Amino acid sequence: MKVYKIPEATVMRLSIYSRFLHQLLEDEVNTVASGDIASGVGVSSAQVRKDLAYFGEFGTRGVGYKVEELYGHLMKILGLDQNWNVIIIGAGKLGSALALYKGFEDRGFKVTSILDVDNKRIMKQIGDVTVESLDLLEERVREQGIKIGVVTVPAAAAQDVTDQLVAAGVKAILNFSPRVIKVPNDVILRNVDLSVNLEVLSFNLALQK
Amino acid sequence: MKVYKIPEATVMRLSIYSRFLHQLLEDEVNTVASGDIASGVGVSSAQVRKDLAYFGEFGTRGVGYKVEELYGHLMKILGLDQNWNVIIIGAGKLGSALALYKGFEDRGFKVTSILDVDNKRIMKQIGDVTVESLDLLEERVREQGIKIGVVTVPAAAAQDVTDQLVAAGVKAILNFSPRVIKVPNDVILRNVDLSVNLEVLSFNLALQK
């Protein structure tokens, strides 16, 4: 499948639609109108139709979408018709919290490796995984077929760890460290700044004044 | 200031612009064109102009924006011209990681209170804050003037904790628990699902195949 320039906001909404459809499947609902999806997740139905239109024709006018079919399409588009092994670098509080985060496994992301440089953390058990030395990075990436790395190390170490992930063959990196890091063009980088979530709240609180 | 229906994606971009402007200020850059902001943060310059246009006229045609002025405007729009005390409910791994997260304090969010029901966690020291009993919720919210609450409790407890936050006078809630929770109309709710970040990666990885 070849798709150009899908806005990131669309991808994030597809993710939300797929969760809503999953809920409908559990409730044994067979068909759904774009308006139902829209009101279920809190966007306009025009937005739902526009987002889905990026990927071809799914629904039938006047009938709506077949829930199971659309759900399957969305999961495939999101790359979630397969499982992904994930490596976390940094076994501090955030790394540990992410390793134990239920939401990842529900969507097919399995944390199979957690590495650190700190001897006090190495050999610690986090869920099913034992923290190991960063020296094992290349070996673990290779044997576990890992494409996705998560960086939760302190800012000063973030670029170095990222370079090592890239050298080991990781193709997509989620960076939780506050440092701006660089990756080659063929590697996907996503920076997560958790405070943006609080700023959406403070923005709305400031509006109310 | 009265502003209607600002898309959330715009608010999140304003946050990113403000960080970029802060960096320019540190580098002692005085004026900036929308194109510079655009390439600095990776969006189109039309997008930058459109986002800023929601809030009135800032720049001068052909000259661009005064960095300090625009930065000040954006911080005010985001509600970041003041500090916000934040209460975290749930002192598990995620709650602890968030309490220690440097990015919050950099943007004016100060975690002043962390509560839990688990006696093994109560009295634990997390950064500057001592974990206290959930029984103190109302008291802490009142004396610390808290408007923002962060929920990191297990799914089964999320709605109950949310109700308690609302009853205590909290006006905005960031929910990290996987449970869909309900709040009254005058309370702002934001659900954070960390796996969406991984799905943006798997979407792009799936495209490359």
Image (spheres, coloured by chain):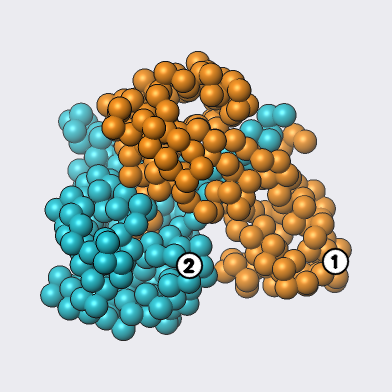
Chain colours: A cyan, B orange
Three-letter code for the amino acid on which mark 2 is drawn: Ala
Pick the residue in front: A119 or A91: A119
Residue A96, position as x, y percentages in the image: 29, 53
Sort mark 1 into few (<14), some (14-19) or many (20+) by Cα contacts within 10 Å: few
In what element is the residue under mark 2?
Answer: helix
- Mark-to-mark CA distance, 2 and 1: 38 Å
Residue type indicated by callout 1: Arg
Q: Give the quadrant of residue A136.
A: bottom left
Residue farthest toward the top in the current orientation of the protein: B167
Residue depicted at 74% across the width and 57% down the height: B71
State left or right for residue A71 relative to residue A94: left
Nearer the observer, B168 or A39: B168
Q: Which residue is mark 1?
A: B61
Tell me where residue B52 appears, x and y as whole percent.
72, 54
The residue under label 2 is: A155
Give the residue at x 28% y 32%. B120
